[in-house]
Image (cartoon, rainbow, N blue to C red):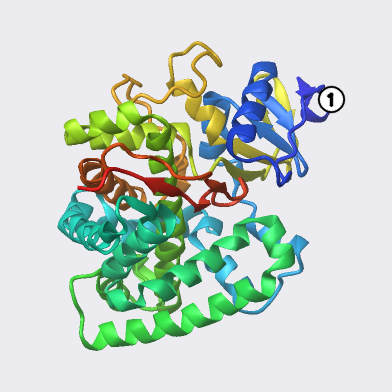
Amino acid sequence: MTLVSELELPNLDYNDPQLRGPRFHAAMRELREQSWLATGPFGYVVLDREASEMFLRTRSAIFPGMKIAEIFGVTEGPLYEEMRRNILHINGADHTRLRSLVNPALAPRAVERYRPLARGLLEELFAASASRAGKCEFVDDFAKPYPSQMIAAVMGAPLTDAPRLHHWSNWIQRQFDAASMMEEREGIELAVVEFYEYAGELVRTRREDPGDDLISKLIAAEEEGENGENGKLSDVECVNLILNVLIGGVDTTQSQLAHAVRLFAEHPEQWQLLAERPELAAAAVEEVLRVEPITPFTARITTEELTFRDVTFPADTVVMVCAFTGNRDLGDGAGTSGWDDFDITAERGKARALTFGAGVHYCLGANLARVELQEALAYLPSRMPELTLDGEPVYESIMGIYGLSALPVRFTAQ
């Protein structure tokens, strides 16, 4: 066995602010050609699918969020309490209990009911932008409002609250980016406080007037037990699960939809095919998730010594799991050949992309996100023919949620 620290490995500085867009693709291809493992600023990076799945699924590694909190001195206050109660930082029996209570409302069959809502929202957004003679800023006009409106409906909140939900989600999500934790902690903390107040009031409203929404279902589960006993929810757990659904379902879907439309604008023949065959929308979503995951890196920290491929990772080793490179093992199986191939008709096998994670911390809202993306990619191609870029996309950081802050496009107005 060899200690991981004894290996000669290539280096990836994933904190480099210039590492995004085509430059990011090229750097990752070069790195993957050298090794399945690299060093990074805080630990190591695993680059292939098998290694990525192992670190995501093993019970010998956890999400290092509380370690990040410790490093940045977040040891008390609302942000600390939110992080401590975030389902990402909860493991074992408590994690299983919380997931079992929220999963039914977000199961594949359960989220099918939201397809008509998604279509209606898309129609309204398109109608609002159609007067612009075949041009739009896709992030502001579609990608940003669409998922926040969907989450508002799922939560049982008024659709008019969607902009506030988007604002809170965007800020609270920054806790997962070390640079933001260092530079923007005050803003993150304020968003947590404001959302707790908002969610608490929403829970009180739904307690008095329950509906057919996620919060009402969580309240029902909460009221069946006492203070988290007998497998049920406490009041605090209820509010924090609502927060988890919010921050896991707004910026993420916004970013993935923006990258999807960018990819299709760069591959117009695929957009035309999708317009002619909207039944390919589900396959198109999977291909988008594979090629440009909006969670290119997911952190883990080992809780005990772990050996993989005759390499020993000591306890407290930080590992960044790279979905971007791991997903490419679902391609043609020829290493980095066809690195950036994008084909919505290609057979990729049964294995799914690592974009939503794997193992016990697999994304709670993955099914809802797929429905939202599928409906968008079934609706938009026939309404936005001859889609092309109308300027350069503005890429955001690859750390945290990897999105676009601007995506100007044009198409043939109908």
Q: Residue furthest front?
A: 133
Q: Which amino acid does label 1 sit on?
A: Glu
**For residue 161, which quarter of the picture?**
bottom left
Q: Please state if 347 lies on the left or on the right of 170 as rendered.
A: left
Q: Nearest the camera: 13 or 137?
A: 137
Location of the N terminus by quadrant is top right
| Secondary structure beneath label 1 | helix
Residue depicted at x 59% and y 74%: 81
Residue depicted at x 53% and y 58%: 90
- Where's residue 280, x and y in %? 22, 32
Residue depicted at x 59% and y 79%: 190
Q: Please state if 381 lies on the left or on the right of 15 as rendered.
A: left
Residue depicted at x 64% and y 40%: 320
* Above or below, comparing residue 83 to residue 96 in the picture: below
Q: Please state if 107 lies on the left or on the right of 355 as rendered.
A: left
Q: Nearest the camera: 167 or 273?
A: 273
- Where's residue 233, x and y in %? 37, 71
